Amino acid sequence: MLAMFSGGGTTYYHQDHLSVRLTTDASGNVASQEGHLPFGEQWYQSGSGDKFVFTSYDRDSESGLDYALAHYYNSSTGTFCSADPLAGDPSVILAF
């Protein structure tokens, strides 16, 4: 996501290779900054943070878990809370 239009204002999202690190308004003023440790734990946050955090997962405010498309991710342990819904087949080898 590059920008969000809401309430007559625009918020721009500045990302690195993992997450949004900085959000700014249309004038270039910094709205928030975030940093994460290697497995997604919050390192620092300033300003009004967004619910989309580490790797743009949606963080649940009650449980603190990140919704990672098909299952939940626990950033404090660096593990997923359930197995993948589609099991892999070890006999299949992909060649690129």
Image (tube, helix red, strand yellow):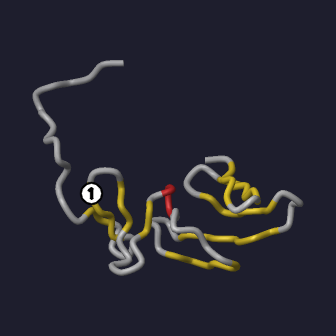
Q: In this view of the protein, which residue sits in the foreground, 20 or 88?
A: 20
Decide: is 66 above or below 87: below
Q: Position of residue 36 (x, y in %)?
A: 55, 70
Q: At 47% from the left edge and 74% from the top edge, which residue is drawn?
A: 41
Left or right: residue 28 compared with residue 54: right
Q: Quadrant of residue 59?
A: bottom left
Quadrant of the image for the C terminus? top left
Q: Quadrant of residue 19?
A: bottom right
Left or right: residue 51 compared with residue 94: right
Q: Position of residue 10 (x, y in %)?
A: 75, 56
Q: Position of residue 21 (x, y in %)?
A: 66, 63
Q: In this view of the protein, which residue sits in the foreground, 10 or 28?
A: 10
Decide: is 68 above or below 78: above
Residue most toward the front? 8
| Residue on which disc 1 sits | 71
Check disc 1: other Cα within 10 Å, few if <14, some if 14-19, many if 20+: some
| SS type, badge 1 | strand
Decide: is 41 above or below 38: below
Q: At 71% from the left edge and 63% from the top edge, which residue is drawn?
A: 22
Q: In this view of the protein, which residue sits in the foreground, 38 or 19?
A: 19
Q: Position of residue 47 (x, y in %)?
A: 70, 78
Decide: is 86 above or below 51: above
Residue most toward the top? 96
Q: At 63% from the left edge and 78% from the top edge, which residue is drawn?
A: 45
Residue most toward the right? 27
Q: Amino acid at mark 1?
A: His
